[in-house]
């Protein structure tokens, strides 16, 4: 293997999360410039892995270990993983897509599009030979033509039942987006009828400007989706057990007002059962439309071949979820400021608290956790409706977020530090798949193709911050019961690292594993590490004979060490060697 010249500096890095096990890693800076995948392979071949760096941004500013402006770590997009803030299992979702036909993108995720777009497509045929099951068609057609082609020549457009099939189909394709057999029929009749008759005009529906959810009949008898606030004449229907009649109401109203009018004076807005009924309707003048009772409600994605929809792989652009005024969900930039919904839970009974203050997602989460239980999680349709009714008709944060980033060594990313204070990346306008750590104190995301210096890591220690206030002896006992020791600090680099951790607590002080001998007055670490590094407020260790004094790291004193009574109560940090598999 080719050996690159290296400038190596060992520092301690910690991956921070209160009351959870944290890995400390010894890092080696490699001063070669290379793209992400080459950095990944280099670190693999060098018997380590690209750095699992979370708090490194604060440390690098102090250490300036390389003289370079930024480094690329191995945090990258692997899979979409939506989670509830309170750790509830995600058993229900209500995402809303914009369009009506599904396709696979070049990265394997799915997206939706207007169905008249021209794309290549993937057919399938029932065949025991997996290599012959999927058939790539490199001709560009709209979705309906592609479906018809597959049904005539093979079985149908492909359906995808799991991640393994998704990957196999991707390998058959040739690097461009292609149609699959997924389509969305979200259209519902106002009166609840199940009529499947639809007669759209050319290239419709298109949800133009993502703002067309109501249906009008045009002068030629075909249908068009349009903005629901548009003022149109409309058809009402009267239904009895024996007869059904309809009238054109010549008042210009929005779709919703037309629905109210029909329900007050007739039965409902009109449901069109078939072509014969459609032909009987009085047609509007050219360039006008009349409302009928069809509108876009909850998404209803189905496979063309009628297979059950057991797996999806939708791509979403952002990392935090909002509940919209119609009850559907959407993703949003976590740094945007919105109102939000908290919840409390007492004896398995949940109450919902509407907070009509605008905050970004992370601040909203913190507010809910400090004052209530957490940001709201939603477990079924009835909860979704109850929560929507508590809100005030505007989009608001819920506790759902997407942690789609994973370290190349298999660790899950549970903390990042972004300059926009949202904790979660925005992925705005372009694909951002590799994490970069800047010396100026923030982590940003950069593309795989951008060349950066890299950091390789070797895992060495496991660190746990315990936020329960305890006496020094209680803290020692707790750590020993966990086969660890109260934290010791042997260098300025370790001091800076622990200071980063301490800075996240609400407490002004955190116990160190450092105590003064009651008899002789000298200070010692409980893990028997030599006292080779010290950082006292007084500049030197206090000498108080026959005392019961222990050391804390003091946030109020710039993270210097102070001598206090061992009977005081503070949070503490345990540290243990990480046992490698």
Image (cartoon, rainbow, N blue to C red):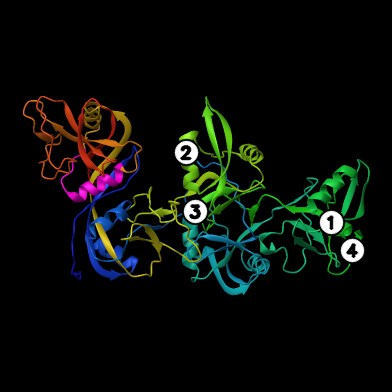
Residue 379: x and y in percent read 56, 38
Residue 284 occupies which quadrant of the picture? bottom right
Q: Residue at x 36, y 57 (%)?
A: 442
Name the residue beneath numbered marker 4. Answer: 283
Q: Nearer the viewer, residue 546 or 122?
A: 546
Q: Is any atom of residue 151 visible in this view?
A: yes
Task: Find the distance from the CA under tag 2 to the CA under tag 4.
Answer: 54 Å
Name the residue beneath numbered marker 1. Answer: 274
Mark 2 lies on a secondary structure that is loop
Of labels 2 and 4, the one closer to you: 2
User: Tag 1 or tag 2, which sits nearer the N-term?
Assistant: 2
Magenta segment, which residues?
Answer: 487-502
User: Tag 4 or tag 3, which sits nearer the N-term?
Assistant: 4
Query: Is residue 493 inside the magenta stretch?
Result: yes
- Few, some or many residues within 10 Å of mark 1 (<14, 14–19, 20+): few
Q: Is any atom of residue 50 visible in this view?
A: no
The answer to whether the residues at label 1 and label 4 have Cβ atoms under 8 Å apart is no
The answer to whether the residues at label 2 and label 1 have Cβ atoms under 8 Å apart is no
Q: Which mark is residue 335?
A: 3
Task: Find the distance from the CA under tag 2 to the CA under tag 1.
Answer: 49 Å
Residue 368: x and y in percent read 50, 38
């Amino acid at each position: 293997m080719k050996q690159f010249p290296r400038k190596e500096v060992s520092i301690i890095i910690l991956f921070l999360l209160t009351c959870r096990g944290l890995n400390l890693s010894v890092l080696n800076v490699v001063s070669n410039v290379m793209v992400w995948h080459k950095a990944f392979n280099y670190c693999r071949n060098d018997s380590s892995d690209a750095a699992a760096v979370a708090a490194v941004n604060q440390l690098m500013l102090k250490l300036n270990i390389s003289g370079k402006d930024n480094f690329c770590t191995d945090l990258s997009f692997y899979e979409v993983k939506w989670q509830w803030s309170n750790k509830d299992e995600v058993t229900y979702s209500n995402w809303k897509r914009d369009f009506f036909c599904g396709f696979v993108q070049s990265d394997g995720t799915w997206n939706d599009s207007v169905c008249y777009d021209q794309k290549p497509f993937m057919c399938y045929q029932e065949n025991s030979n997996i290599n012959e099951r999927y058939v790539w068609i490199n001709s560009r057609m709209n979705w309906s033509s592609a479906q018809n082609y597959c049904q005539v020549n093979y079985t149908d457009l492909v359906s995808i039942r799991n991640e393994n099939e998704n990957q196999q189909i991707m390998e058959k394709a040739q690097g461009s987006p292609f149609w699959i057999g997924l389509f969305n029929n979200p259209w519902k009749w106002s009166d609840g009828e199940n009529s499947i008759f639809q007669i759209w005009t050319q290239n419709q529906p298109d949800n133009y400007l993502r703002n067309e959810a109501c249906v009008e009949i045009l002068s030629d008898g075909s249908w068009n989706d349009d903005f629901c606030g548009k003022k149109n004449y409309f058809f009402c229907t009267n239904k009895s057990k024996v007869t059904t009649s309809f009238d054109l109401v010549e008042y210009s109203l929005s779709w919703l007002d037309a629905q109210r009018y029909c329900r007050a004076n007739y039965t409902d807005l009109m449901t069109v059962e078939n072509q014969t009924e459609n032909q009987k309707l009085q047609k509007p003048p050219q360039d006008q439309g009349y409302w009928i009772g069809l509108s876009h409600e909850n998404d209803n994605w189905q496979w063309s071949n009628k297979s059950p929809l057991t797996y999806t792989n939708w791509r979403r652009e952002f990392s935090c979820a909002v509940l919209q005024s119609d009850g559907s969900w959407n993703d949003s930039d976590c740094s945007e400021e919105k109102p939000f919904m908290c919840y409390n839970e007492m004896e398995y009974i949940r109450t919902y608290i509407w907070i009509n203050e605008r905050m970004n997602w992370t601040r909203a989460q913190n507010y809910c956790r400090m004052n209530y239980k957490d940001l709201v999680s939603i477990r079924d349709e009835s909860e979704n409706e109850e929560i929507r009714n508590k809100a005030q008709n505007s989009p608001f944060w819920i506790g759902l977020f997407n942690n789609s980033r994973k370290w190349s060594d298999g660790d899950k990313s549970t903390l990042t530090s972004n300059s926009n204070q949202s904790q979660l990346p925005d992925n705005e306008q372009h694909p951002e798949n590799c994490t970069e750590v800047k010396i100026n104190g923030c982590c940003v995301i950069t593309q795989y193709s951008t060349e950066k210096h890299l950091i390789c890591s070797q895992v060495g220690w496991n660190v746990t911050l315990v936020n329960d206030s305890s006496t020094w002896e209680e803290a020692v006992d707790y750590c020993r019961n966990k086969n660890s020791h109260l934290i010791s600090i042997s260098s300025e680099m370790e001091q800076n690292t622990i200071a980063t951790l301490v800075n996240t607590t609400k407490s002004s002080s955190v116990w160190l594993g450092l105590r003064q001998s009651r008899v002789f007055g000298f200070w010692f670490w409980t893990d028997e590490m030599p006292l080779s590094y010290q950082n006292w407020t007084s500049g030197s260790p206090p000498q108080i004979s026959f005392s019961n004094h222990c050391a804390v790291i003091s946030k109020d004193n710039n993270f210097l060490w102070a001598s206090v009574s061992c009977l005081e109560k503070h949070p503490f940090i345990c540290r243990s060697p990480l046992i490698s598999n």
